[in-house]
Image: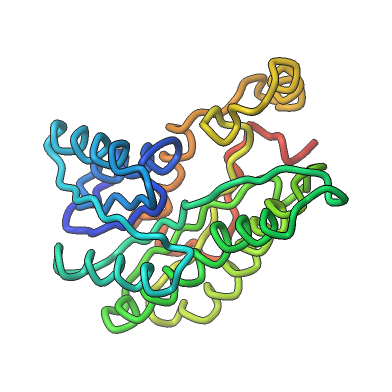
Amino acid sequence: MIDLSGKVAVVTGASRGIGAGIAERLAAQGAKVVVNHRASAEGAEAVAARIHEAGGQAVVVQADVSQSADAQRLIKTAIDTFGGLHILVNNAGTTRDMVIMMMKEDDWETVIRTNLNSTFYCSKAAVRHMMRKRYGRIINITSVVGLAGQAGQTNYAASKAGIIGFTKSLAKEVGSRGITVNAVAPGFVPTTLTDVLTEEQRAQAIEMTPLGRLGSVEDVANAVAFLAADEASFITGQVLSVDGGLVMQ
């Protein structure tokens, strides 16, 4: 059984969906968790409450991690509150889907800033502490869209592909300090970000997936928990697709 006792984890964008599932799973394995949100205080508090009810430890921290100062404050709060930082999960993300000819520049900037810039800002702040301790686990949530592309999602695909390149490069930079950096690429997982899919699109997604079903938040959280554990200490710079085989198609 994965044991994260004594570890401190920050999960960005953890008020709902995949982020919430990751926060609760890490806490269930013994980690003290910082539940981050930008503007969903009620959701984040509910996640923390479920963690407390299950016997875990969690605090809620509001921070817009697409802004450097907020990302630094988030990491500092985690260290000040729990005495350290061992695990960073860069999960915060958004979509603004549209074909490129009709995509607004602000929608491009918003997705890049929220998905990619936040990963840079939080990782930079966390690495400073992790390098001194010579230990760390950074897990970035990308997407199969970053691997295969998707019509109408040039902004989202660019941000998620950027996260993959960032992951591999950072893994090479900090590996000698005992820090692993990996990415998890979910396939079709029902969340608020995929609620826009029609029933026809959901059926197509299932048909394209060799395992014949949509993924679940738990599927992704399980992968993150493994990469955060000591059992994964010799794995770095990798992209783990949690997609039922979709990326092979």
**Residue positioned 36% across, 68% down in the render:** 70
The x, y position of residue 154, in whole percent, is: 77, 52
Quarter of the rendering containing residue 67: bottom left
Quick check: 122 above or below 59? below
Residues 153 and 25: in front is 153
Residues 152 and 119: in front is 152
How many discs appear?
0
Quick check: 245 above or below 67? above
The x, y position of residue 177, in whole percent, is: 39, 81
Residues 225 and 72: in front is 72
Quadrant containing the C terminus is top right
**Residue positioned 24% across, 44% down in the render:** 27
The x, y position of residue 126, in whole percent, is: 36, 72
101 to the left or right of 198: right
**Residue positioned 65% across, 24% down in the render:** 211
**Residue positioned 51% across, 60% down in the render:** 182
Quadrant containing the N terminus is top left
The x, y position of residue 78, in whole percent, is: 23, 64
How was the colour assigned to the protein in this rendering?
Answer: rainbow
Quarter of the rendering containing residue 189: top right
For residue 218, say whether it is visible: yes
For residue 28, say whether it is visible: no
129 to the left or right of 183: left
119 to the left or right of 20: right
**Furthest residue to the right?**
101
Quarter of the rendering containing residue 188: top right
